[in-house]
Amino acid sequence: MRLVIQRVREASVSIDGKVVSAIGPGLFILVGVENGDTEDDMRWLAAKAAAMRIFNDEGGVMNRSVVEAGGELLAVSQFTLTASTRKGNRPSYIRAAGHELAVPLYEGFCEALASIAGRVVRTGVFGADMQCALVNDGPVTIIIDSRLRE
């Protein structure tokens, strides 16, 4: 599984011009699920995202997690995070997990993150054509791949 975590001042997801989820300051998280990903990957990433110290403390140093900073959370599924760009100019999505694996791991990630963070995780709509808007704060963008944890 791969995450792209962005510290935001605000973020929203719209479908057909209607906002379906929105947050204020917090984390906007894109979630990509690959074939072979497991519940262990999902749980590890949820814990990592909740504990990532990318919010400023009183001294202006990035030393607080989203939980400590009281930030909100928005997680959106994005199969294109699994793209292989090794050959040619057309990305291959062959590694992207199908719905039978991706949906439970995405939903499990959101549930695990909510449990760890002690707050609601807003979401997009799995498989929908979504328009995401955000104001990246910093900018701060972190990429985490569960297959690269060692």
Image: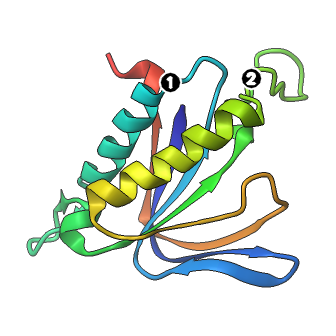
Spatial CA distance of label 2 from label 1 is: 20 Å
Residue at numbered disc 2: 84
Q: Earlier in the sequence, mark 2 or mark 1?
A: 1
Q: Which mark is residue 38?
A: 1
Q: Is residue 90 left or right of residue 80?
A: right
Alpha-carbon neighbours of circle 2 within 10 Å: few (<14), some, or many (≥20)?
some
Q: Quadrant of the N terminus?
A: top right
In this view, the residue in front, 8 or 79, is: 79
In this view, the residue in front, 96 or 118, is: 118
Residue appearing at x 85%, y 61% in the figure:
129
Alpha-carbon neighbours of circle 1 within 10 Å: few (<14), some, or many (≥20)?
some
Note whether 118 is above or below 22 in the view shown: above
Residue 54 visible within the image:
no
Residue 67 visible within the image:
yes
Give the x, y percent position of residue 68. Answer: 18, 67
Note whether 35 is above or below 56 in the view shown: above
Give the x, y percent position of residue 90. Answer: 90, 29
